[in-house]
Amino acid sequence: MNSTLFDAYVADEKKIEPKDWMPDAYRKTLVRQISQHAHSEVVGMLPEANWISRAPSLKRKAILMAKVQDEAGHGLYLYSAAETLGVEREDLYLDLLEGKAKYSSIFNYPTQSWADIGAIGWLVDGAAIMNQVPLCKCSYGPYARAMVRVCKEESFHQRQGFQIMLVMTEGSAEQKAMAQDAMNRWWWPALMMFGPPDGDSPNSAQSMKWNIKRFSNDELRQKFVDMTVPQAELIGLTVPDADLKWNEQTGHYDFGEIDWSEFKRVIKGGGPCNVQRLAACNKAWNDGTWVRQAATAYAEKKSSNATR
Ligand code: FAQ
């Protein structure tokens, strides 16, 4: 295969598998996106894990523990998908630990109240699903297949988050205020999850041509706004955007300007929790050294027994 045949092959909705020929830049783009995605799932456990010990009931605690474990699983599928491209999981992870690799901006915001757990499930998992369902049709087979299972689990996450918000908005005035406060703090960062505006997105054009991305950042952001605003109305929450307005002509909601300077600051390491998140990942890695050593020693022992 060559580049021209490859382009025609993916344009024909055919899947690329690990042993197939692929342009170096395609491989590089996939390693970049899949590893950033894997890191996001892993770092994404931290804000929610912060509330496991403080969940308001045994049932909520069990649900939250299951959700956080699911995110770990998503990280594992994604690192495995990245490894099919000829990179080592440990190298990717060390880049994260050293602050060289990106992960989603959203996980650099703090979880200040229980309502934040509802807002994360509803808005953050909601945005993740919007972005990831199209990835189930991405041209790279292992990534597309990993996304099918991830999306099924994310939809349970989204439903549990919405249900937390629903219960809180039907509760006391204080609980309703907590839900609104969480909505106010998570709305704009959730919109930033889709990435920079299309005109400012260096990777989009090529990734769309290769059928890695199936919709642009702005298209997905708009779909998310259109889906979520009626849900907020249903549970009596106000979207914190004075410019939000239904547009009869376009059949979409118009919405206000996103603070892209905040987005840039957060992805450069200047968000409220970037330092804390990397410190937690490094601590977990260092504390887990003995586990990795024990697992490696056990695997070596088993394989030497097998060859005896
Ligand atoms: N945060 O040219 P584009 C989840 C970077 S998983 C940080 O538009 P691209 C589940 C981008 O990497 C959430 N960086 O880039 C969960 C690029 O940098 P580079 C993660 C961002 O790749 C829920 C540069 O800006 N989901 O939430 C962000 O074509 C609850 C230029 O941007 C995925 O990763 C950002 N928000 O499009 C877990 C989905 N946006 O590499 C726990 C897969 C952009 O050139 C709890 N990824 N950047 O240095 C994608 O779909 C894409 O990578 C985009 C970005 C859409 C994120």
Image (cartoon, rainbow, N blue to C red):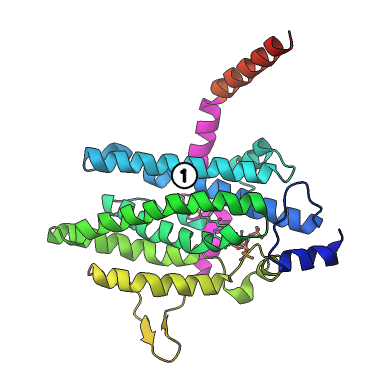
Q: Residue at (65%, 35%) from the top-left corner?
A: 90
Tell which of 135 and 255 is nearer to you: 135
Q: Main secondary structure of the magenta part?
A: helix
The location of residue 147, given as percent across then percent down, is 55, 53
Q: Quadrant of the C terminus?
A: top right
Q: Is mark 1 within 8 Å of ligand 1?
A: yes
Q: Residue at (12%, 58%) from the top-left corner?
A: 172
Task: Give, as a three-letter code, the residue at label 1.
Answer: Glu
Q: Residue at (56%, 40%) from the top-left corner?
A: 76
Magenta range is: 260-288
Ligand 1 rendered quadrant = bottom right
Q: Residue at (53%, 26%) from the top-left corner?
A: 288
From the viewer's perspective, is residue 179 above or below residue 227? above
Visible in this render: residue 29?
Answer: yes
User: Disc count in the image?
Assistant: 1
Q: Quadrant of residue 2?
A: bottom right
The location of residue 116, given as percent across then percent down, is 32, 54
Mark 1: secondary structure: helix
The reply, left or right, for residue 300 in relation to residue 224 is right
**Residue that mark 1 sits on:** 71
The location of residue 165, given as percent across then percent down, is 26, 58
